[in-house]
Each structure stands twice: as structure tokens, then as C-alpha cells.
Amino acid sequence: MKIKLIDIAHGRSGDKGDAANVGIIAYDDAGYDIIKKHLTTERVKEHFKGICFGIIERYELPNLRALNFILNNTLGGGGTVSLKHDAQGKTLAAALLRMEIEV
């Protein structure tokens, strides 16, 4: 069965220079187990191909049932120098929550 991440989690995103910060927070323990297993750096990189040109780092926060991703080389230099519409990465969590995963 395929589900979208938005069915089991919510998210927040922002920036630090040219790196976007995307947090995905599961609603419950079962959802956290799913995102921990299926939401890999490779899957996130594929989801953001054409947007993220650097490495992706993943951090697990089990006490919050969350994963935090740093998407390096994503924002065109950052808010003050970028010509991108979302130079601060505010919409990237919403974009990631649209990802479908097989469970």
C-alpha cells in the first residue's frame, strides 16, 4: 500500500545560508518507525533532484519521533543572494510531505 508522508507526519523547514533544514515529525510511534525505515537520504535526494545539489545529512531524534535533514547546496547561496523564489527553504517540508512511500 502506498501512502504520502503527510498522512503520518508533519514537517517544518528553514535555512542556514545555502543549506535547507527539513524536519519530518511523525504523529505516533508507528509513523516514526515507518519514516525511520523508508525516509533515507537517497530517497530525499531523489525527491529533490534538480533542487538539491549537495550531500544530504540525516539526524534521528527518537524522543521527538522526528528526522532532520540538512540539504546542502540547495538554496542558490541563501536568502540574501539567491534568485530562487524560495531562497529560505520554507516550502521544502511541504514538498517532502508529498512523497509517497510503500508500506
Image (cartoon, rainbow, N blue to C red):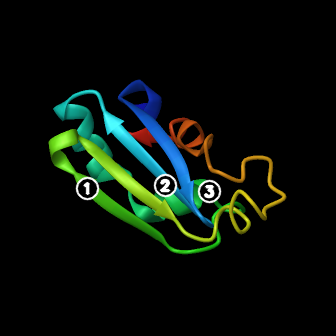
Residue 32: image quadrant is: top left
Q: Quadrant of the C terminus?
A: top left
Question: Looking at the rendered structure, which numbered label has been put on residue 60?
Answer: 1
> Who's the residue at 38% across and 59% down the image?
40
> Who's the residue at 78% across and 65% down the image?
81
Foreground pick, 85 / 10: 85
Three-letter amino acid code at the position of disc 1? Glu
| Residue 8 image offset from top left, x and y in percent | 35, 28
Q: Residues within 10 Å of mark 3 (few under 14, many from 20)?
A: some
Foreground pick, 12 / 56: 12
Instruction: Give the CA distance from mark 1 to mark 3.
Output: 20 Å
Tag 1 secondary structure: strand
Left or right, residue 36 beside residue 62: right
Instruction: Give the CA distance from mark 3 to mark 2.
Output: 13 Å
Disc 2 marks which residue? 21
> Who's the residue at 58% across and 53% down the image?
47
Q: Are the residues flagged by discs 1 and 2 in contact, CB closer than 8 Å?
A: no
Mark earlier in primary sequence (3, 2): 2
Residue 3 visible here: no
Q: Quadrant of the N terminus?
A: top left
Disc 3 marks which residue? 48
| Residue 22 image offset from top left, x and y in percent | 47, 50
